[in-house]
Image (spheres, rainbow, N blue to C red):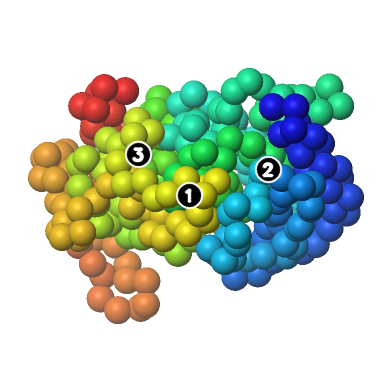
Amino acid sequence: MTKAKASIQLAYKEMLTQEGARDAPFGGSGGPLCSYGRVSPKGRVKTENNAPCHASLQHWDSCDVEVFYNWHRHHTAPTYNRAWVKFLLSKQSPWRAVTGASPPITVKGKLINSPRFVLKHGFILYNLDVPANLMVNFLIASRAAYEHPKQIKWWKWLVDAGIHPAVAFFFCGQVHSRVSKRYTLNWTSYGHWALNEDGCDKDYFKNFCTGTVVRPSKLFSESTSYRPCNKVWGTPDMVDRHDYAEYFDGAYGKQQKTITVPSAFGGKPRVVKSYTKRKLIQCISKEQRRIGL
């Protein structure tokens, strides 16, 4: 651990050196978003600046990484980012194997896996003996408040209503507000998103929410090849694309009411099934209890 701590100190020094670049304009998905780098066992430091995502990791030589560091590029932190980071670092996080390394380490008297440190400087990750697809799945999630602020706003809305934070993340990308304070679940997937909600089954939902890795790749310390990282939580290759969505709608369809909503493209109005907030929260809460959370 003494050797790792020396590498952590080098990572911290590099992050401080690069700190001025944090004020670069935010480009959103596809624009400058994050910077990340590595410290090798021999103390070599290499940083990749202004990256739109973490895709270049698949070309790294993983044997040359002892400590990994990552921060996001934005002159102002997005709304709810503090709550989001606290969740990522908590015991409720599905990615706790990545962020909850032990023993805790400090640099300059600062605990590096504390929310205060991460919000100011970024993540320093030194437990690299985790599946590479879990590591990158976490890194995708770490960008969520920047890339998908609308979805993280819904995440906070669900958490404030009493939903477990992991369950809330599973549903936050699907909730849409409709007329007359009613809500729908659209079951769609997003680019640069850590889940495949529109192509998963009930086991995938439970595995993610409980942090149960069932399809691990090689360890990040052995190989940074991570694709497809979203399948770290399961999903058989032949699963029906809408398996979980059909299950949920079937189990809780009686709580829905049809409403007419305007077309997004100026066409004829559409009839959709919707929930009141109370009914939606009740249904998600039942799913949460079903998996023991």
Q: Nearer the viewer, residue 179 or 245?
A: 245
Mark 1 = which residue? 132
Element at label 2: strand
Amino acid marked by disc 2: Val
Amino acid marked by disc 1: Ala
74 left or right, relative to 14:
left
Residue at image location 76% in from the left, 57% down from the top: 46
Residue at image location 45% in from the left, 57% down from the top: 226
Residue at image location 71% in from the left, 54% down from the top: 37
- Asked if disc 1 and disc 3 are in contact, CB closer than 8 Å, the reply is no
Can residue 277 be spotted in the picture? no
Q: Position of residue 160 (x, y in %)?
A: 47, 29
Label placed on residue 213: 3
- Asked if disc 2 and disc 1 are in contact, CB closer than 8 Å, the reply is no
Distance from Cα at disc 1 to Cα at disc 3: 12 Å
155 left or right, relative to 30:
left
Identify the image quadrant of the N terminus. top right
Identify the image quadrant of the C terminus. top left
Label placed on residue 71: none
Crowdedness of circle 2 by 10 Å Cα count: few (<14), some, many (20+)?
many
Q: Position of residue 23 (x, y in %)?
A: 83, 57
Distance from Cα at disc 3 to Cα at disc 2: 22 Å
Element at label 3: loop
Mark 2 = which residue? 67
- Chain-order first, disc 1 or disc 3: 1
Can residue 82 be spotted in the picture? yes
- Chain-order first, disc 2 or disc 1: 2
